[in-house]
Image (spheres, rainbow, N blue to C red):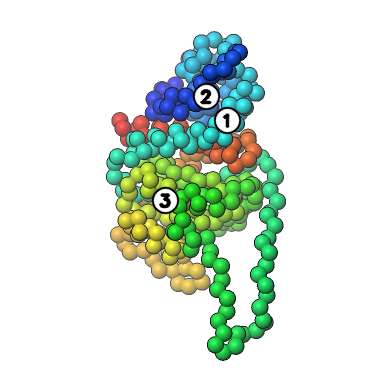
């Protein structure tokens, strides 16, 4: 674990991002935010479920404490200090910036074969937010079929139809991120639900996540495919986009082709007969198992199952510290 933690820290280049927290006022300077960021990364590498467990380990393990930056156990800050620093990191999206820099620096210069896209449920210890009030309904027209020569009013465009013509920032701002209830069928065909969020990931060969978006649990996977594709295209150059049947929509096919990629999406029957993939595409589609492995790793080893914070910003910050550790481990293996 100590060696893995050193490998992760060597790729994060934290000093590039924590300089904004340097103290330049009067009085006692606050605890170094670089050391606190080291500690939050260590929390996921060493699999400490709570900040209390992390602080206890820092006080009882001299090597871990020194790797994070503190010389003695008396220098370890209190839990409220950790909480305040975490809030700052969540507000500034610090782990997202660290992750993006790692990916563009170490994976961006190389050609990527496959990008596997998938989403996973994230349970959170909070109540579902109240649904927003519905928009004012449009004035009702005449009932029945329109008269000859009359054309019905056009339906408002759907999110998937608007996304290809908007920027990444506009698409991300349009996605809901409040806590609510999600529902899906598991691998055995049973319906299951959860309260919390949904994490959407793009993973490249080598089980390395390169892009992440957090949304409400009720958001369908297909609604995040185009924003994820935009984000990933800014970070790496890839050839194939691999997605399951939830992403089988003409707008997603077209946007992937527009980026110069080859979309390989498992066909969705939609009340018709399912058309199987061509043999060559079906063989290449097997590489999509990278997305399943990364989702499992994030939950089992990097904190995805023990979310103890509330609010989309803090939940994303917690998950991204885990993704920083996971990504750095995968990148270090590729570099070696």
* Disc number lying in front (3 or 2): 2
* Disc number lying in front (2 or 1): 2
**To which residue does mark 2 refer?**
21
**To which residue does mark 3 refer?**
230
**To which residue does mark 1 refer?**
88
Separation (CA) of disc 3 from disc 2:
30 Å
> Taking the image as drawn, is residue 82 in sight?
yes
Determine which quarter of the picture holds residue 73.
Answer: top right
**Mark 2 falls on what kind of element?**
helix
Separation (CA) of disc 1 from disc 3:
27 Å
x then y, percent, for residue 25: 57, 17
x then y, percent, for residue 297: 47, 39
> Taking the image as drawn, is residue 46 in sight?
no
**Residue 165 appears left or right of 335:** right
Sooner in the amino-acid sequence: mark 2 or mark 1: 2
x then y, percent, for residue 133: 70, 57
Marks 2,1: beta carbons within 8 A: yes
At label 2, counting other C-alpha atoms closer than 10 Å, the crowd grade (few under 14, some 14-19, many 20 or more) is some
Separation (CA) of disc 2 from disc 1:
9 Å
């Amino acid at each position: 674990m100590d060696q893995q933690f050193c490998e992760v820290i060597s790729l994060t280049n934290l000093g590039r991002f924590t300089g904004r927290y340097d103290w330049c006022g009067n009085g006692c300077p606050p605890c170094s935010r670089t050391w606190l960021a080291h500690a939050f990364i260590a929390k996921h590498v060493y699999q400490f479920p709570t900040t209390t467990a992390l602080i206890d380990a820092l006080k009882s393990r001299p090597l871990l404490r020194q790797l994070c930056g503190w010389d003695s156990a008396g220098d370890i800050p209190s839990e409220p200090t950790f909480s305040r620093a975490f809030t700052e990191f969540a507000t500034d999206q610090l782990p997202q910036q660290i992750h993006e820099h790692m990916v563009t620096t170490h994976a961006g210069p190389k050609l990527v074969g496959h990008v596997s896209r998938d989403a996973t449920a994230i349970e959170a210890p909070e109540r579902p937010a109240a649904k927003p009030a519905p928009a004012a309904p449009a004035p009702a027209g005449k009932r029945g079929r329109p008269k000859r020569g009359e054309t019905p009013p056009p339906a408002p465009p759907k999110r998937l139809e608007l996304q290809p013509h908007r920027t990444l920032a506009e698409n991300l701002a349009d996605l809901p991120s409040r806590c609510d209830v999600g529902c899906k069928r598991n691998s055995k065909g049973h319906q299951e639900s959860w309260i919390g969020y949904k994490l959407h990931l793009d993973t490249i060969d080598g089980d390395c996540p390169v892009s992440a978006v957090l949304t409400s649990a009720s958001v369908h996977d297909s609604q995040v495919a185009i924003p994820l594709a935009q984000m990933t295209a800014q970070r790496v150059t890839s050839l194939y986009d691999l997605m399951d049947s939830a992403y089988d929509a003409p707008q997603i096919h077209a946007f992937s082709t527009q980026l110069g990629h080859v979309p390989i999406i498992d066909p969705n029957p939609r009340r018709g007969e399912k058309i199987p993939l061509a043999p060559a595409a079906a063989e290449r589609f097997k590489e999509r198992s990278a997305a399943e492995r990364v989702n499992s790793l994030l939950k089992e080893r990097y904190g995805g199952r023990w979310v103890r914070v509330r609010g989309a910003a803090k939940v994303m910050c917690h998950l991204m510290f885990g993704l920083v550790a996971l990504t750095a481990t995968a990148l270090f293996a590729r570099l070696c």
